[in-house]
Image (tube, grey):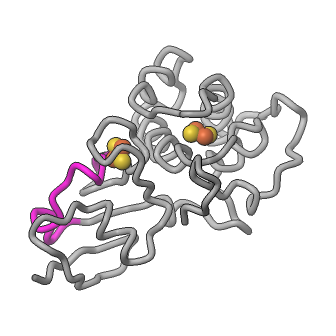
Amino acid sequence: MEIKLTINDESKTVEVEPDDDLATVLRQNGYTGVKCGCDSGVCGASKVFVDDEVKMACGVDAPNADGSEIRTIEALGTQDDLHPIQEAFVDHFAVQCGFCIPGMIIEAESLLADTPDPSEAEVREAIDDNLCRCTGYQKPVEAILDAADRMRGEQSVAADGGSQIRPDQADCTDHDGDTNE
Ligand code: FES
Ligand code: FES
């Protein structure tokens, strides 16, 4: 069957199977920033905006998404023009393997849209369903707090004084060492 989606402001008609989930469909259509970690709605890796609400795409039945507006991490920034949240993640060395990062950044964007000056506790609560197998939680929290400052126009000071990580090194691999793009 075919469904219509608006993905990152582009109208698309996509072919789906009745039992497809949205994460699978997005990845099949090239939105590989949507990660499939648990495939059961518990790890946060597949978070996207669906009609402006953060959802775990693996838990959304694709046929039911017909007519929805989807926004994925691909809409946020590019390697040459990073979003302040992405910049802050790079500057704070908040990326290890990177697999969980798109979902964390989507959640961070949602948090900062509603709460531009969050407390550390609010940041931790926002990403408490984003599981990181590299157990790198402290630096993402610092990065999100710094991104909030940057987005409010306040001076930011990266924890390390600046990044040595290039954006193209922030790509993820799965834990078997295979590329997971
Ligand atoms: S893959 Fe969707 S929440 Fe884990
Ligand atoms: S950086 Fe989070 S799973 Fe590796």
- From the viewer's perspective, tell me whether residue 97 is left or right of residue 5: right
Q: Nearer the viewer, residue 32 or 174?
A: 174
- The residue positioned 62% from the left and 33% from the top of the image is 134
Q: Nearer the viewer, residue 94 or 6?
A: 94
Q: Most extreme residue toward the top, as rendered?
A: 121
- The residue positioned 69% from the left and 37% from the top of the image is 94
Q: Most extreme residue toward the front, as rendered?
A: 176
| Above or below, 117 relative to 81 | above
Q: Is residue 28 magenta?
A: no
- The residue positioned 42% from the left and 25% from the top of the image is 128
Q: Quadrant of ligand 1?
A: top left
Q: Quadrant for the N terminus, please.
A: bottom left
- From the viewer's perspective, tell me whether residue 79 is left or right of residue 45: right
- From the viewer's perspective, tell me whether residue 124 is left or right of residue 98: left
Please give the range of residues in magenta.
53-68
| Above or below, 43 relative to 52 | above
Question: How many numbered tags mark residues here?
Answer: 0
Q: What is the quadrant of residue 62 in the picture?
A: bottom left
- The residue positioned 83% from the left and 50% from the top of the image is 165
- Residue 181 % position (x, y): 55, 66
Q: What is the quadrant of residue 117 in the picture?
A: top right
Q: Is residue 60 magenta?
A: yes
- Residue 84 % position (x, y): 65, 49
- Residue 23 % position (x, y): 32, 60
Q: Nearer the viewer, residue 105 or 62?
A: 62
